[in-house]
Image (tube, rainbow, N blue to C red):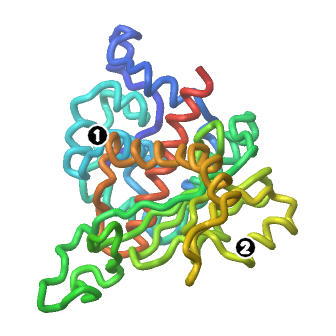
Amino acid sequence: MHRSSGQLGFGDGFLDPGLGRNQRLDAIDAAIDWEPLDRLVRVLYSAGEGRPSYRPLTMVKALLLQQWYGLSDVRLEEVLSDTLSYRRFVGLSLEDGTPDHSTISRFRTALCRHELDTALFEEVLGQLEAKGMVLKEGTLLDATLVSAQARRPGREAGMGGKSSHDPDADWTRKNGRSHFGYKAHVAVDQGSGVIRQAILTPAKTSESEVADDLVCGDEQAVYADKAYEHKERRARLKAAGIKDRVMHRNHRYQAALPYWQQRRNALIAPIRAAVERVFGTLKRSYGYERVGYVGLKRNATQFRLLCIAFNLKKAAKLSA
């Protein structure tokens, strides 16, 4: 059994110190204190999972690499075997073995079972807040559709038909097109771009249903498009002393918005639109057009890992 100690092995002493360095990974590694994350996941040693073959923190860092580079479990196993910079980042010496794809999968499942993905997300966010990287001037709310891993139910099932392979995935319509899968909801810090809240739901869940869970409570303002408009929500924001920057929408029997509401929407729109850059990065750079797994809980774990990876990369950039 191979167990990574996080220490250099005998063979590492013969390497040029600059060999296999990756400046981006080095910057991310230096952006936070990893010890609190190590303590969080160390409980897996005594959580009835059996003693892991590799340090839990090594496995967490491996899962983060997977998000940044859009790797499957099999491909992650391969690159950890032959890429020195990746081995340095996760804490594997030249003499250490490499976790195989089944070990990687089991560890992710253990994180999900013990809800440690949520704890890791909150720990990283807390460190960024302590460093002053979360400005709290405003929170930008938005959601994006992500396709299911499972095949769409056949035409005979019709819109709304369930998949026997992934019963948690569901249907919705947007811009006249039908979508089958999930919806990723985020709250993004205005100015820094750090993700402060992340929730995954079936695609049919409306933005308004989860909006209150995305409001952090300590921001100066909340920016959102018209899908988030709700009379009671506006009242709650006002009562909390949070500026209401939710766009207005036409209501039934209303021919057009009053001019002042149109003008207000026009002022809010470009500020709120900054959240779309986050989704652009997740989809184009991290390949998050489609979820990686089956079932809401497993895919929610993937989404939180993705957001942790995003925030760490953002932290390295803000530190620089």
Q: Of the residues shown, which amino acid type is indicated by label 1?
A: Gly
The percent position of residue 93, horizontal first and vertical second, equals: 36, 29
| Along the line of sight, the residue nearer the viewer: 291 or 9 | 291
- Please indicate whether residue 32 sits to the left or right of residue 65 in the image: right
Q: Circle 2 — which element? A: helix
Q: Which residue is mark 2?
A: 233
- Please indicate whether residue 254 sits to the left or right of residue 53 in the image: right
Q: Residue 152 is drawn in which quadrant? A: bottom left
Residue at (34% x, 31% y) in the render:
86
The percent position of residue 189, horizontal first and vertical second, equals: 65, 46
The percent position of residue 74, horizontal first and vertical second, equals: 20, 50
Q: Does residue 38 appear anywhere in the picture? A: no
Q: Residue 166 is drawn in which quadrant? A: bottom left
Q: Of the residues shown, which amino acid type is indicated by label 2?
A: Arg
Residue at (54% x, 43% y) in the render:
274
The answer to which of marks 1 and 2 sits earlier in the sequence is 1
Q: Which residue is mark 1?
A: 97
